[in-house]
Amino acid sequence: QVQLVESGGGLVQTGGSLRLACEASWDILSFYEMGWYRQVPGNERGMVANIHNGGTIHYADSVKGRFTISRDNAKNTVYLQMNSLKPEDTAVYYCNAKRNPWQNYWGQGTQVTVSS
């Protein structure tokens, strides 16, 4: 069973930074894509950033230039560095790993709150 454990969320002021980490219980090279999503109550979960095994990276337009996704294969960990945080970044952030279209795994989520 694949487990994804997020850490690094918390409360930060506008303009501050946080780094989220997602540690997988499996070799992350076994997933063709890993990424971060976020969700606020009443809204759908939306993609924030993802990284493919080949190195391709995608970001949501709202975070381009502020967030950076990276991976440490040796530690089976994916990171999301979040800079210049805004109140609208407040959400529960979820780690996601895709092994194939029908094997899609989620972490338990970590709360990020940005105060104005």
Image: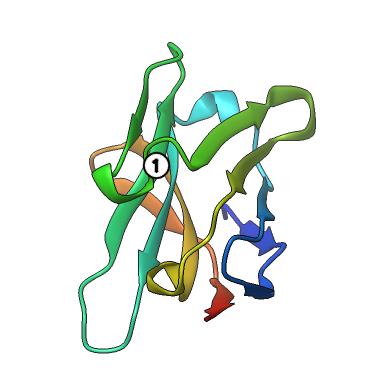
| Amino acid at circle 1 | Ala
Instruction: Give the residue number, with chain letter if any, for mark 1.
Output: 49
Check the image and name the residue furthest to the right: 75
Please give the name of the residue rendered at 69% of the width and 24% of the height, measured from the top-left corner. Answer: 73
Question: Dot 1: few (<14), some (14–19), or many (≥20) neighbours within 10 Å?
Answer: many
Residue 80: horizontal and vertical position, in percent? 58, 45
Q: Against 96, is 90 above or below?
A: below
Residue 10: horizontal and vertical position, in percent? 68, 75
Instruction: Tell whether 97 sits left or right of 103.
Output: right
Figure label count: 1
**Depth check: 79 or 90 in front?**
90
Chosen colour scheme: rainbow
Check the image and name the residue furthest to the top: 54
Residue 52: horizontal and vertical position, in percent? 41, 23
Query: The N terminus is located in which quarter?
Result: bottom right
Please give the name of the residue rendered at 57% of the width and 69% of the height, measured from the top-left corner. Answer: 14
Residue 76 falls in which quadrant of the image? top right
Q: Against 58, is 12 above or below?
A: below
Q: Against 32, is 107 above or below?
A: below
Please give the name of the residue rendered at 78% of the width and 24% of the height, measured from the top-left corner. Answer: 74
Please give the name of the residue rendered at 31% of the width and 88% of the height, measured from the top-left corner. Answer: 41
**Depth check: 18 or 39 in front?**
18
Instruction: Tell whether 34 sits left or right of 11.
Output: left
Q: Identify the element where label 1 is drawn.
A: strand
Q: Against 48, is 40 above or below?
A: below
Residue 6 falls in which quadrant of the image? bottom right
